[in-house]
Image (spheres, rainbow, N blue to C red):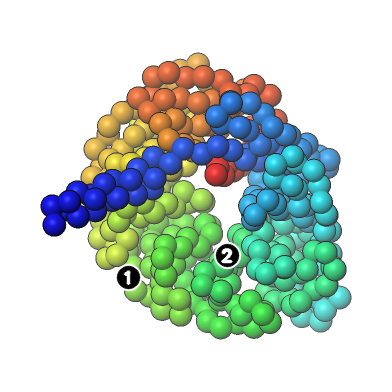
Amino acid sequence: MVKYLYSLCFILFLYSCSENEKEYKNLYLTTDTSDVYCFDLTKKQLLWHSKAENEYNNELTFFTIKGDKLIKAYLDCNIVQFNKFNGKKEWELKDTISSQHRYYDYDFDNIRYVMFSQYPAVYKDNIIFGNSKGEIKSVNPLTKKVNWIYQNPNPIITSPKILNNVLFINLGYDVISLNLENGKMISRITFDKGIPNEVVFDEDKIYVVTEYGSVFCLNENLEIVWEHKRPLEKLYINKNVFIHHNNLYFGNKVIIALNKTTGDLQWEHKLDNKDGENSLLSIDKYPDGIIVNTANSILKISKSGKIIKEKKFHNKQLFGEILSSGKHYFYTTTDGNLYSIDEELEKEEIIYDKINLSTKKSFENTYMYAE
């Protein structure tokens, strides 16, 4: 019995380490210039770089990794599949406004035709995405066959996401679910405040945060499980919604932690904003809590809200997301450097010094994924 308990403890220890201190081999990075980079983190070197060919692509869009493919959406309504190991283009799909669009008589005359913040989603052999003309589409990129189109009267500002073979999408004031096979609506919920962020999943629950910081936990039928109301202080939350351990974290000038199961407030931490540059840029995890970055600082915060470590920067500004890998954190700065820093936030190293960035605008300026 004792031997069994020791074995069980050892297995749980290994599982905990693999879950919380996972060290990644490759880092994929895109910026608000739409360039895509792949780095070998073990060798700390660039593997490949794809430069965006159209200068019009000057806002951040995302990508999806599936198998050995990286599928990247662009602001100019192009979607490109790369081989993730060598960066070679395998196909390109140019989205166009559908012929049926004009029959809906929606007013998009003053809306430019782009893709905002798309990944896209991948289902079977199809990709699913939305555009600024209110169309959500399922398309086979190889045959160019359009499987279905869902028409919406407002621009699609966040990417569709898949949970348990159902498509969920934020439409600004509504969240809807669609059948992945035919695009027909399954459920809808409407909110009285706008939702700037994409929907966030955890297990079988869906989380949305309004622009004023109210949080809603929904089930897969889009029924409210709990809600946490905030004072009318506009946070304009974008992608800074993150779940780790049993907490949901979000914020802008203040970082807020809620119990993800009940919605109860766990703690708040107000960021030092004396210079006006210290809004929350992103959140990632470390074993005992979260690591966050602002334009001039990195903070390690325990799951109970205690500040474990803070690193302030006086000679450079951070830009976009921070990513945790093993005992190191990776981030970019406005001078185009990709940095690594150790878990004590002391030893800093430049991994690459030619990241192509635009620092003129945008709430979110880089997107990183590692595996």
| Residue 56 placement: quadrant | top right
Residue indicated by mark 1: 226
Q: Is residue 366 left or right of residue 6?
A: right
* Residue at the limit of the structure toward the left, as seen here: 2
- Give the residue at x 82% y 79%: 100
Mark 1 and mark 2: span between their CA atoms? 21 Å
Asked if residue 207 can be seen in this view, the reply is: no
Mark 2: few/some/many CA within 10 Å (<14, 14-19, 20+)? many
| Residue 218 placement: quadrant | bottom left
| Residue 153 placement: quadrant | bottom right
- Give the residue at x 63% y 39%: 29
- Give the residue at x 51% y 51%: 238
Asked if residue 187 can be seen in this view, the reply is: yes
Query: Which image quarter is the C terminus in?
Result: top right
Is residue 80 depicted above or below 104 in this figure?
Answer: above
- Give the residue at x 45% y 76%: 220
Is residue 264 depicted above or below 58 in this figure?
Answer: below
Q: Position of residue 324 (x, y in %)?
A: 45, 37
What is the three-letter code of the residue carrying label 1? Trp
- Give 14 or 81, whichever is nearer the viewer: 14
Q: Position of residue 112 (x, y in %)?
A: 77, 57
Residue indicated by mark 2: 161
Query: For numbered disc 2, what is the local secondary structure?
Result: strand
